[in-house]
Image: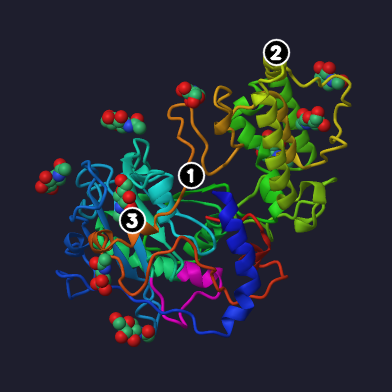
Amino acid sequence: MLRPIITFLALACGLVSAQRSQKLPSSFPHDYPGKPSGAFGPEWQKYFEVTDQLPNVTFPFARNFAGNIPVDRPNHPNNTLFFWAFEKENGSLTANAGESNEPWGLWLNGGPGSSSLIAALFENGLLQIQNDYTIAANNWSWNQLADYVWIDQPVGVGFSTVDSDGYVKDEDQMATDFFGFLANLVKVFPSLQNRPLYITGESYAGTYIPYLVKAYFGMTNPPVKLAKFVIGDGTLNTDAVGENLPALSVIETYPQLIGYDPEVYGYFKEQSQLCGYDLNLTYPQNGHFPNLTPPGLPDGNSADSRFSSSTRLRSKQALLSEAKARLSDESEPASKEKRDSWLQEKRDLSGRPNGTIDTFYGCFLWAEMMDYALNFSLPWVNISNVDLLQGLDLYDLPDGLDPETVRSQSDAAFFLNDNRTRTALHAPTSKNWVMSIRYPFGNVQGSADPSKFACQISNLQF
Ligand SMILES: *[C@@H]1O[C@H](CO)[C@@H](O)[C@H](O)[C@H]1NC(C)=O
Ligand SMILES: *[C@@H]1O[C@H](CO)[C@@H](O)[C@H](O)[C@H]1NC(C)=O
Ligand SMILES: *[C@@H]1O[C@H](CO)[C@@H](O)[C@H](O)[C@H]1NC(C)=O
Ligand SMILES: *[C@@H]1O[C@H](CO)[C@@H](O)[C@H](O)[C@H]1NC(C)=O
Ligand SMILES: *[C@@H]1O[C@H](CO)[C@@H](O)[C@H](O)[C@H]1NC(C)=O
Ligand SMILES: *[C@@H]1O[C@H](CO)[C@@H](O)[C@H](O)[C@H]1NC(C)=O
Ligand SMILES: *[C@@H]1O[C@H](CO)[C@@H](O)[C@H](O)[C@H]1NC(C)=O
Ligand SMILES: *[C@@H]1O[C@H](CO)[C@@H](O)[C@H](O)[C@H]1NC(C)=O
Ligand SMILES: *[C@@H]1O[C@H](CO)[C@@H](O)[C@H](O)[C@H]1NC(C)=O
């Protein structure tokens, strides 16, 4: 999933300033029959409920609701966010005010400028588009945990609509819009006002979500009750830190990466601490997110070129090719033996000076972890099927319960722009859904503002 988007974003970033002089596209929500005329309230549930048959969905599934809701930004009536909400149980989302204390969650993709319907249709949602464009039920969809809402935001992204001059100009405006939308959403589903809310997301939502939380704590009367927030594979701080700081928790989540070896775990834990990656944040945080500059990890994207994101991606391909070659080299009589011994090998840690940072990898723990896994444990490999060798793709991790098939496409446009889908979801007709737009924050590159940082990250997506 990574590769096509990298090209797109690299291109996108170069074009942002050029694009600013042009008029940005306008869009607006579509009024479907039965739309209530008054202010938002529970009577809108019937309007938003998805009752039409969706193309290629051949099984019954949870009750769900979708459509556009204004963010209520003054002078921008066409600025809306698009939501798609799935119930945990029949009637759980439409409970009356005060009738439920069940948690609810919302999901945000990143980009900036990527639709959250990517997750709804390829990651954690109920309906999952397959490689052949058929749709299967995801038995582990997050609405089995709680009422869950996937939201396209900021305005203009996915099926969300925006006036030409209404795109958000920074993260604070993004958050204001978002709470404007939420204030309306909870009028439609009044029980949500007082139920514990989990804001969850991935990638550039790692930047959006802290700004949402900041806005939340700045409100005297927030429309929702925030319980927790969760960020997966988030974009925070510099690219290098974002990649290396969580390496140890990735190992803790997937200990098969190091062959479940406690000694190797101890090694990575020590490296992580020596590099300062075990930092703890407080709320309110005093100042900015700490700028980690441990030995061996130059600040930000000027990181050692051996371990820069693009180099790593390239070398990951090289390592994978090498692994494929090693695994499939049946021509060599000793090959099976070689392969078995390779897989059984374990890293020899003796002779390593304790309490010092590795001299080759420095603080590039992500690279070290990947190399270790590729050298010794190959957890992602189905060794009887070399074609399944694909490396560790954080967006497509097979889990122990349900090894996913390798995803060869992630194109939801066909499904979402089909008129039957569009109509069923009460989606706009003034625009077509695209996975990602280059989001024009209106900033110039080069300062530390996270909304600019996005343009500097080559592998940023989703
Ligand atoms: C859900 O509940 C409603 C009544 O609230 C009922 O009419 C409907 O048949 C139920 N749907 C399912 C799938 O159980
Ligand atoms: C999902 O659950 C249904 C019903 O229990 C079952 O028939 C189906 O095989 C499951 N799908 C997967 C991919 O496990
Ligand atoms: C909002 O959308 C309507 C169409 O529904 C359009 O006529 C109007 O010009 C739009 N307003 C702005 C400010 O773009
Ligand atoms: C952060 O907190 C954890 C858990 O309390 C602790 O083990 C760790 O040493 C702390 N890290 C630092 C740098 O103080
Ligand atoms: C590192 O320290 C641990 C515990 O003090 C010890 O068991 C281990 O043998 C040491 N390793 C090396 C390479 O000296
Ligand atoms: C992986 O193997 C290569 C080649 O033998 C070696 O240079 C590198 O240090 C190893 N890395 C790790 C983390 O095991
Ligand atoms: C590995 O691949 C082989 C050959 O394609 C297949 O038969 C087997 O089911 C796969 N094993 C797993 C655990 O996916
Ligand atoms: C429905 O699935 C078929 C494959 O069976 C595919 O060709 C078609 O494009 C899909 N239609 C939509 C609207 O996604
Ligand atoms: C889909 O709907 C739009 C707007 O209502 C219409 O212009 C278009 O012709 C429709 N497309 C198809 C394939 O029916």
Tell me, for residue 415, which label it has, or none: 3
* Identity, as a three-letter code, of the amino acid under mark 3: Phe
Q: Which residue is mark 1?
A: 408
Label 3, label 1: how many angstroms apart (C-alpha)? 16 Å
Image quarter of residue 442 = bottom right
Q: Say left or right for 91 vs 109.
A: left
Q: Say left or right for 1 vs 77.
A: right
Residue shown at the point (52%, 37%) measured from the top left: 397
* Identity, as a three-letter code, of the amino acid under mark 2: Glu
Q: Secondary structure at mark 1?
A: loop
Asked whether mark 3 and ligand 8 are closer than 8 Å, the reply comes as yes
User: In which quadrant of this rendering is ligand 1 seen?
Assistant: top left
Is residue 121 a member of the stretch shown in magenta?
A: no
Q: From which residue to which does the magenta span run?
A: 161-176
Label 2, label 1: how many angstroms apart (C-alpha)? 32 Å
Q: Residues within 10 Å of mark 1 (few under 14, many from 20)?
A: few
Looking at the image, tell me whether mark 3 or mark 1 is earlier in sequence order.
Answer: 1
Tell me, for residue 337, which label it has, or none: 2
> Where does the image place residue 358, in percent across and percent down from the top left?
84, 34
